[in-house]
Image (cartoon, rainbow, N blue to C red):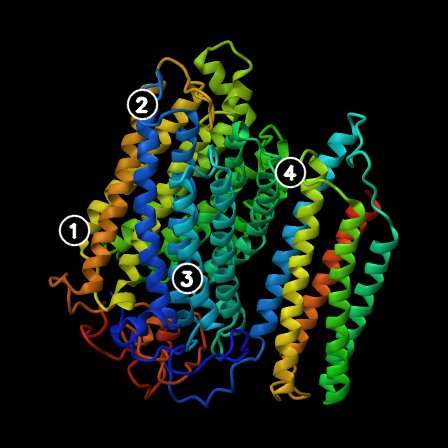
Amino acid sequence: MALTESRTPTDARTAGAPETATLDGLLGSADHKTLGRFWIAGGLLCLVGALIVSAVAGLETIDLGSFTVASDADQFTQIWSLGREVLLFGGLLPILVGLATYLVPLQIGAPAIAFARGAAGAFWAWLIGTALLVVSYIFNGGPGGGRADFVVLWAVSLGLVILALLWAMVIVATTILGARTIGMTLDRTPFASWSFLVFCLYGILTLPLVVADLALTYVRVRHGFVPLDARQTLVGVTNLFTYAPPLFWLAIPALGMAADTIGVHTGRPVMLRKPIMAAIGALSVISYGAVYFSFGSVRSVDFNNFILVLDIAATALPILAVLGLAGESIRRGTPRLNVAFIGSLLGGLLFLLAAVTALLGLFEPVQLWLIDKADTGNPDKLLILNGTTFHDGLRGIVVGATVLSITGALHHWAPKIWGRRMAEPLGYAAVLAAAGGGVLWGLGGVLAGVDNQPAYPVSSLAGGDNVELYNLIALIGILAVAAGALLTVLSALQASVGANTADAGAPAWSGLTLEWATSSPPSPGNFDQPPVVRSATPLADDVSGAAPAETTTGTEAGGEA
Amino acid sequence: MTDISLYQRIPVDVPESPPARPRLLLIATSLVAAAVIVGYVGLTSYYAQVRQGVLSTDQPWLPSGVTIPLTQPNFMLLTMVFSAVAMAWALSAVRHDDRPNAFIAFALTLMFGFAQIAQTAYLLTLMRMPAAGNPAAALIYTMVGLQLATMAMAMGYVVAMALRTLGGGYSARDYEGVLSATVFWFTNVGVYIILWYAVYITK
């Protein structure tokens, strides 16, 4: 079957035939479940690696006197930039794409993902691109790099990574739009799948800007238009996704997954579906950065733009709406305080904290009020805050929130992905570390920004009297988030290899959406026959004489109340 | 506490499902076309911004000695319009199971595509613009390069769909692939029109 085949693929490899243990079977697989696991595993490893690199950059900033870890400002820029880029394009986005690749066909009742071999191509292209990206930095490339060939390689490899993610998002969005089972209208689509659709459409309409910028960067660097001493400025290429409001792009799938997860673990599906779906959609519109960060202004953001400030202020509203409606389920139901529930809820709350922080930091009257309270007597402080590490702090909170959401989602869907639950004790520790780390990372970065630490990249590290202390707080936060991510990796590893014997045989959760209607992990083709959906909670539809929805395989015994 | 039995049931007494909706290729193509347009419009807006910045300082936008003739860009526009007509002809022919006309139209479309690439190469030769040393050069080469990349993708797409039509994969009953290729070809024409106006006409 060709890449452009239009029908839902049904041949053995693409429709999830039994996976062989051979290398050929794994590497050649186009089964969305295998690819989803690949994305998640690769993304988790990159996430931990990127956080460690970010911690190394943070270590540099706790002593402003001179460069100690890095040899000079250029190398510091490289370390910081490597951590920032791999964190997003190598870690968080691939994990979310992996969850979408795995879950979407199951949730919408499809036997396979659209363009299955194209989906496999996207993963391998991403993997190769990420490896080349790291290689380019190792050989003195990237922003701040001293070897022009490897700066060019950086532009090419980052472009490849983004194009691979873009293609994967096109495939996920196409699957949701065109491969839903009978009766599965868009408004009956589970929250997670709906949020993945919004998330992917956002990426499709935003990532091309970065690709175009990278193409321009390639031409400029290739022909010497960007001299070596100006290459620190190249970090601006990825600024689009590291400032509010586009930073809240990551909140879109997090909120959708949380709505599904909270509904299951309270025993009360989240009601008022359409308002929640509207809120998730509104968040994408509000945080659509391309409107403000139009290509040319990516490198110098005007945060005094009133519309932009108003928009950032508005990002809190949809997050609050989703959390509020999910809170109604918590109030009416009986919450199970497990990792899936706590991680999802805390992730949402941390996103809310990030939105409020953005509001506090960027809304002019609030800034003026802060300046008045601080009695600095410096009216320029308003502008200084906008060019400081304040935004790195904001990004830290969002990273912590996303790690929390991913941890919660993995614990929730682990029975589907690996056939067994993830270890709860490790999960609690991971959630605690990620939540605390996100708050500390944010606190340190924000306070350092208020204390006049200039935004990176910098030619020399500088700031107010207490900046070193604030940077230490941020460093502790980064390390804590890294520890949380590492614990999640260990827990996922345990679940995937079956070492978690305590929970082996534990049943899947009793969700009401289609993924819980099939075995765990799902059988080849996902469903014995195409399911027919009559409501948003198909497993709650009482049909006389219907066969039990849950089939059991392997370690699973049945549902749990 | 929730009712377990309620949760464990799914309706099975339902009629057999119809085949999957054959729109996946068209949806995916539309999404990719949207991405291409967003990226190109973003790049064009940056081009306009930088150009405006240079002109506001009373400096010339193009390097001295560089001129962009109008003949070649206008002929390229005409070529692209003809290619769009040929592509629409191919689609119409496939929809009517008129295979001879379909293959003539596919061949014409590809020929116009090659002609546009050749004319671009000739235009760049005439312009003789050094790649380095001027903000305009990098931007113009990037915009032209991305347009050519879009053209290459579109031509590859048309070749694939033409071969599939040749193999009997598409006909009046199912022409989704050809329709998708047509959507992408029109996107490609749109990209050239942006380039034509923003760079070749406005200069």
Comes first in the chain, label 2 or label 4: 2
Relative image position of residue A526 (x, y in whole percent) = 36, 77
Of the two numbered discs 4 and 1 in the rendering, the one whose residue sits closer to the viewer:
4
Q: Earlier in the sequence, mark 3 or mark 1?
A: 3
Residue sitting at 11 percent across and 62 percent down?
A502
Query: For the point 34% across and 49% down, which residue is it?
Result: A46
Q: Which residue is mark 4?
A: A296
Q: Are marks 3 and 2 on the same chain?
A: yes
Q: How far, Cα to Cα, is label 2 from label 1? A: 38 Å
Question: Helix or strand or loop: what does disc 1 sit on?
Answer: helix
Q: Position of residue A468 (x, y in %)?
A: 33, 19
Residue A124 tag number: 3
Look at the image and tell me whether residue A272 can be seen.
Answer: no
- Kind of residue sitting beneath label 4: Gly
Q: Residue at x 36, y 77 (%)?
A: A16
Give me the C-alpha separation between circle 4 and circle 1: 48 Å
Q: Residue at x 31, y 52 (%)?
A: A44
- Distance from disc 2 to disc 4, alpha carbons, whole Å, reads 35 Å
- Provide the chain ID for the residue under circle 3: A
* Circles 2 and 1 on the same subunit: yes
Quadrant of the image containing the C terminus of chain A: bottom left
- Nearer to us of marks 4 and 3 is 3
Report, in whole angstroms, how far the alpha carbon at label 3 lies from the one at label 2. Answer: 37 Å
Q: Separation of disc 3 and disc 1 at Cα? A: 34 Å
Residue placed under numbered mark 1 in the picture = A425
Residue A316 is tagged as none
Pointers 3 and 1 within a single chain: yes
Question: For numbered disc 3, what is the local secondary structure?
Answer: helix
Residues tagged 4 and 3 counted as in contact (Cβ below 8 A): no
